[in-house]
Image (cartoon, rainbow, N blue to C red):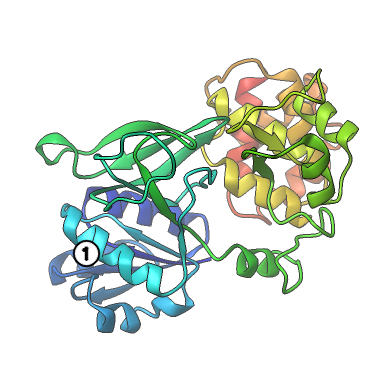
């Protein structure tokens, strides 16, 4: 994925480290040439020196080709202006009920009264670093005193003005789907989950995503198929539900990444691994020190029965080794 990060401070540098390690094509924009020189010498990323809120600078960074723009400077005004340019470029989602993904930017309006859709002026921003059912966590570089900190926000909750998000169709196409953004999970599936809005029924959701009411009820543990609530997250596949559970337990911290990976089909047996692991794991644990130890623990727990496959292929997909070590440590 091509990602533009505006701001090379603490939050920007941390995101650069994580996203570049995950194999993304990252370009960092900052006005300080020393920060740009430092970050491009440490990480395998591109750097552009300039004001990230200026259109010409964003053009130099090829932001029109980016699937995600993240504004992380210490200035809310600059972050918001960067986001407005992003809106012009078509990567803005103005929907309070949107379930964000890791790396999305959430824009807040602290004057929102919580009644109806928030349409005020955005005056603060945070980067989504964790997502779970009904809520998400943002990391901010400009909390009180200019400190880096975290904040938990409710999906469809108060203060949400909107989100800066990837181009999901382009991402799905790169993962092996077609130009409509489908990934092959189903001809109608364009995501791993659906957040219930007013007027939704389980039948309507099933029809929209090309599945059945019974399947959705089983995946999500819904006993009364006629009873769902606004804001509820309905997972569309067993793998998506498994990833969400593992994220809630703190076993993994990048659920969107693994939902997309499972949907892409690029890692054989990944969906089965996630589902079986979610069935066995009840809490996070210290990560296994090696992939071999992790695979051994997963075999002993009955999560996998093809250890040779995982030992031979864990280097073929970004962060697959880290996932195995996290799961292996949690099943002990």
The C terminus lies in quadrant: top right
Along the line of sight, which residue is nearer the eye, 300 or 277? 277
**Left or right: residue 124 compared with residue 192:** left
Q: Is residue 45 visible?
A: no
**Left or right: residue 317 compared with residue 38:** right
Q: Residue 53 at x, y = what percent?
A: 23, 70
What residue sits 31% from the left and 66% below the top? Answer: 84
Along the line of sight, which residue is nearer the eye, 154 or 328? 154
Task: Give the quadrant of residue 214.
Answer: top right
Q: Is residue 69 visible?
A: yes
Residue matched to label 1? 38
Considering only vertical position in the picture, is 122 above or below 179? above
Q: State the residue lying farthest toward the left.
A: 145
Q: Residues within 10 Å of mark 1 (few under 14, many from 20)?
A: few
Considering only vertical position in the picture, is 125 above or below 221? below
Considering only vertical position in the picture, is 63 above or below 210? below
Task: Give the quadrant of residue 109.
Answer: top left
**Left or right: residue 65 compared with residue 70:** right
Task: Give the quadrant of residue 45.
Answer: bottom left
Q: Residue 194 at x, y = what percent?
A: 67, 43
What residue sits 77% from the left and 32% below the top? Answer: 275
What residue sits 43% from the left and 41% below the top? Answer: 129
Q: Residue 49 at x, y = what percent?
A: 20, 75
Along the line of sight, which residue is nearer the eye, 326 or 191? 191
**Left or right: residue 28 compared with residue 187:** left
Q: Secondary structure at mark 1?
A: helix
What residue sits 72% from the left and 70% below the top? Answer: 180
């Amino acid at each position: 994925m091509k990602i533009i990060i505006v701001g090379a401070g603490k939050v920007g540098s941390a995101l650069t480290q994580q996203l570049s390690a995950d194999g993304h094509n990252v370009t960092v924009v900052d006005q300080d040439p020393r920060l740009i020189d430092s970050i491009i010498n440490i990480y395998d990323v591109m750097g552009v020196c300039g004001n990230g809120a200026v259109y010409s600078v964003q053009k130099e960074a090829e932001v029109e080709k980016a699937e995600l723009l993240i504004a992380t400077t210490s200035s809310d005004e600059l972050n918001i202006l960067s986001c407005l340019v992003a809106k012009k470029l078509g990567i803005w989602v103005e929907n309070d009920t949107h379930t964000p993904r890791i790396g999305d930017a959430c824009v807040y309006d602290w004057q929102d009264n919580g009644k109806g859709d928030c349409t005020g002026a955005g005056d603060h921003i945070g980067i989504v670093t964790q997502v779970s059912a009904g809520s998400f966590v943002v990391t901010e570089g400009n909390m009180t005193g200019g400190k880096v900190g975290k904040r938990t926000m409710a999906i469809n909750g108060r203060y949400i003005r909107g989100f800066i998000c990837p181009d999901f169709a382009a991402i799905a196409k790169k993962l092996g789907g077609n130009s409509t953004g489908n990934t092959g999970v189903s001809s109608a599936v364009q995501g791993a989950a659906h957040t219930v809005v007013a007027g939704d029924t389980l039948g309507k959701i099933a029809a929209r995503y090309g599945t059945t009411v019974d399947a959705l009820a089983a995946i999500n543990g819904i006993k009364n198929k006629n009873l769902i609530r606004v804001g509820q997250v309905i997972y569309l596949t067993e793998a998506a539900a498994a990833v969400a559970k593992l994220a809630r337990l703190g076993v993994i911290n990048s659920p969107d990444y693994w939902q997309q990976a499972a949907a892409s089909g690029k890692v054989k047996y990944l969906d089965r691994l996630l589902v079986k692991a979610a069935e066995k794991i009840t809490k996070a644990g210290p990560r296994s020190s090696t992939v071999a130890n992790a695979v051994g623990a997963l075999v002993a727990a009955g999560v996998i029965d093809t250890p040779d496959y995982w030992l031979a292929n864990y280097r073929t997909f970004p962060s697959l080794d880290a996932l195995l070590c996290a799961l292996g440590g949690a099943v002990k």
